Image (spheres, coloured by chain):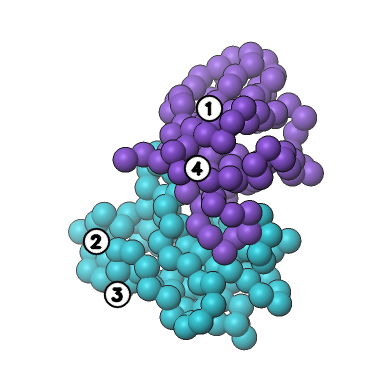
Chain colours: A purple, B cyan
Amino acid sequence: DAMVIQNPRYQVTQFGKPVTLSCSQTLNHNVMYWYQQKSSQAPKLLFHYYDKDFNNEADTPDNFQSRRPNTSFCFLDIRSPGLGDTAMYLCATSREGGHTGELFFGEGSRLTVL
Amino acid sequence: AQSVTQLDSQVPVFEEAPVELRCNYSSSVSVYLFWYVQYPNQGLQLLLKYLSGSTLVKGINGFEAEFNKSQTSFHLRKPSVHISDTAEYFCAVSDGDYKLSFGAGTTVTVRA
């Protein structure tokens, strides 16, 4: 049974047209993460929520926003996508904030900006 | 923040042959080490992790890794690979905060 579900799996959008990616989890984990993974590169952390506390990475572009309305759901909003935002976006959860535990990943949302 | 170096970007290997994927990390007082696997068009799945204790860690699908503190390495091995092991493998490290730093990945292609 899927525990971290991302929608949509594939999204094509036009340059500058806003897009929202969603993530839901059935694990009741308190930490949720968004990673960006470009082709043949390592996943790069964009931001994470520890419960309702939002933590933005210093180099995450202002173009990227996130919302977590409740424990189960988290959204990634890209306000004005550029060609360079074409990537796989991975949502992950963990039970604790420190990394003695495991991250559980969704299958990813592959975004293509034309 | 930690940095992770995966020394091989591509590893071709024949079925039933052994494979070793190399990973080095920047030194720290204490680290937690992970290997993740990513199959095509899927998310990442944990293979194994080192938190403390025995330096030889066994994971799923017959993989194991050895933590070597003096060499700051955490190499992944499997004695006999299958076609189904074709995937991308990521080494990751944390020094206990929320941030997991990933290596650039190693693509393993298993050939019959």
Q: Which residue is mark 1?
A: A22
Q: Which mark is residue B79?
A: 3
**Of the residues shown, which amino acid type is indicated by label 2?**
His
Q: Nearer the viewer, residue B50 or B81?
A: B50
Q: Residues within 10 Å of mark 1 (few under 14, many from 20)?
A: many
Q: Which mark is residue A28?
A: 4
Badges 3 and 4, same chain: no
Disc nearest the viewer among 2 and 4: 4
Q: Quadrant of the C terminus of chain B?
A: bottom left
Residue at 55% across, 26% down: A21
Q: Which residue is mark 2?
A: B82
| Chain for disc number 1 | A
For the residues labelled 3 and 4, the Cα–Cα distance comes to 37 Å
Is residue B22 something that shows in the picture?
no
| Chain for disc number 3 | B
Marks 4 and 1 in Cβ contact (< 8 Å):
no
In terms of secondary structure, where does tag 4 sit?
loop
